[in-house]
Image (tube, rainbow, N blue to C red):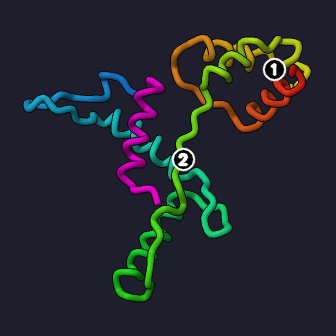
Amino acid sequence: MIRTFVAVDLTVISLIESKKMDDKDFIRTESYSLRLKPSGAKKVTEEFNNRMNKKVAYKKQSVMWSYALLLKARELAQYLVGKRKNIDFSKPAYTVERHDSQDIRQKILEISYTDWKNMGFSKGTLHYMKQNAKGDKPFTLNKHVRERLEQWNNTML
């Protein structure tokens, strides 16, 4: 099971990598440590809520992470009071998925606007994807875009 503070750590790392947070979101204290300003706290809270609202497979169901954490807390309570003999914290497993590998970036840069349009996407979508692929910032792709990109790649082989 994902520990809540790990989810917060991943949230902050994601915000920093995506450059959604900057120096204006922090304040340096007298002891030279960094603290979040209200603007930074709001960004972390919103991103964390987005993470907790994502679905995860747990006990043959698709549930939000927030609910999975509640279920695991209940299991822990039952274990502590002796109503359970064991507890498994390895499930559900939290995975960090990146879509901005060099391979994907290269595929995006190689696809023509004509091929892209034939797959049912707009020219503007590909334009912004190509801009992201040229840059060094991390980015994600929607599931349907990834699937069609894979289809295009398979037809090109």
Q: Residues within 10 Å of mark 1 (few under 14, many from 20)?
A: few
Q: Which mark is residue 106?
A: none
Can you tell which mark lies on residue 122? 1
Q: Looking at the image, which is closer to me, 110 or 65?
A: 110
Label 2 CA crowd tier, 10 Å (few <14, some 14–19, many 20+)? few
Which region of the structure is painted magenta?
1-19
User: 83 and 154: which one is in front?
Assistant: 154
Horizontal and vertical percent for residue 124? 75, 16
Magenta residue check for 129: no
Residue 125 at x, y = what percent?
74, 20
Q: Secondary structure at mark 1?
A: loop
Asked if residue 7 is positioned above or below residue 43 in the image, the reply reads below
Q: Which residue position is annotated with label 2?
A: 95
Q: How far across and down, in percent of the image, does residue 76 sit?
A: 40, 75
In the picture, measured across the screen, residue 23 lies left or right of residue 2, that is left
Amino acid identity at mark 2: Thr
The quarter holding residue 122 reads top right
Secondary structure under the numbered disc 2 in the rendered image? loop
Q: Residue furthest bottom?
A: 83
Q: Earlier in the sequence, mark 2 or mark 1?
A: 2
| Of 155 and 22, the residue lying toward us | 155
Residue drawn where x is 71% and y is 12% of the image: 109
Choose top left, top right, bottom left or bottom right for residue 108: top right
The mark tally for this picture is 2
Q: Residue at x 88, y 16 (%)?
A: 115
Q: Is residue 115 left or right of residue 57?
A: right
The spot of residue 16 in percent (x, y) is 40, 28
